[in-house]
Amino acid sequence: MKKALIFILVISSFTCQAQIDYSWWNQIHHWDGITSWQNYMTISSAYLGPNALPVPENSKGIVDSSAQFEIGGDLHFNKGDHTQDGFVRGFLPFNEHRFALSLEVIPIEFFQTDTIIRDMRASRGRGGKGKAGGDIYFTTYVQVLRDYANLPDISIRAALRTASGTNLGEARYTDGPGYYFDLSIGKNIKLKNDWSMRWYGMIGFYVYQTFDILHLQDDCLLYGGGIDLNYKNFFLSEELTGYSGYLKNGDKPQVFRSSLGWNGKKVLVKVSLQNAIRDFPSERVRFSVAIKIPKWRG
């Protein structure tokens, strides 16, 4: 029994040594032997995985009236980073949808990066292949003005991101908290027959933690706008959104999103395409299904 225990300890020791052998990384990034490896990373949207510092969806000036449970999946396309993930989102409105809470998370993502992307991000994953768990977002929505006279709808949104994302070593998540808040306006316009449209815009603030001892957080201007075109239960959305930081290290991501979907009484189905304009690592295709809870009375 004693010999077996010694054998297990020896094998475990060799395994641990193999896991912490980063001599290849030290050589590539000219490690000085003192500075933490985290300080060799660039904490910005351009130098991390696509789910680390995503551009928030546009807020449209109105709080949704339906309680929903949404589930879906993403395919991210980048020449050197192929990522697939699943996500879930819960949304609950209260007080005649004047106020709402939501929770969103990507429970798991799978990725494969080439050596060029790996080294550009200072990733410590030599093989470039693996999986990670995502951050959790808690969001509050408040309806400030709705259907009043001929004025646009106005709403406020505030979101908190936890530091629950894993695999910082392979540049998948930041292992740090963040938050954003915005004010949005929007207005429905009735067109001919069963057609209608909604225009909307938002402005806000986006903040996340970095590992730069001189700049412990990046403060960003959050902005966006778009148009929804509706015909009966079908809709088409076109929107531009992004945020702009002050560190100038790839922290000014901007994306264009197109969505097509069907919004029924109990089910919402949507397919969306996200095109990266600048400082974002990949294109994205998203498919999601939301189950509505029509009898919910918050």
Image: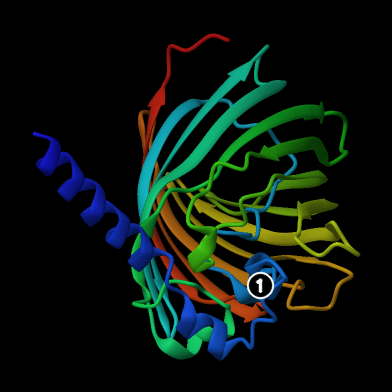
Q: Position of residue 16 (x, y in %)?
A: 35, 58
**Which residue is found at the position 64% from the left and 82% from the top?**
31
- Judge left or right: residue 132 versus residue 214: left
**Which residue is found at the position 51% from the left and 76% from the top?**
282
Q: Residue furthest front?
A: 2
- Judge left or right: residue 260 versus residue 58: left
- Judge left or right: residue 208 versus residue 6: right
Rendered-image quadrant of the C terminus: top right
Q: Is residue 288 visible?
A: no
Q: Is residue 9 visible?
A: yes
For label 1, the residue is 41
Q: Is residue 150 above or below residue 52?
A: above
Q: Position of residue 4 (x, y in %)?
A: 10, 42
Q: Is residue 261 above or below residue 19?
A: above
Q: Position of residue 278 (x, y in %)?
A: 67, 81
- Judge left or right: residue 143 versus residue 40: right
Nearest to the observer: residue 99 or residue 74: 74
Instruction: Tell me the SS state at disc 1.
Output: loop
Q: Is residue 268 above or below residue 256?
A: above
Give the amino acid at mark 1.
Answer: Met
Residue 88 falls in image quadrant: top left
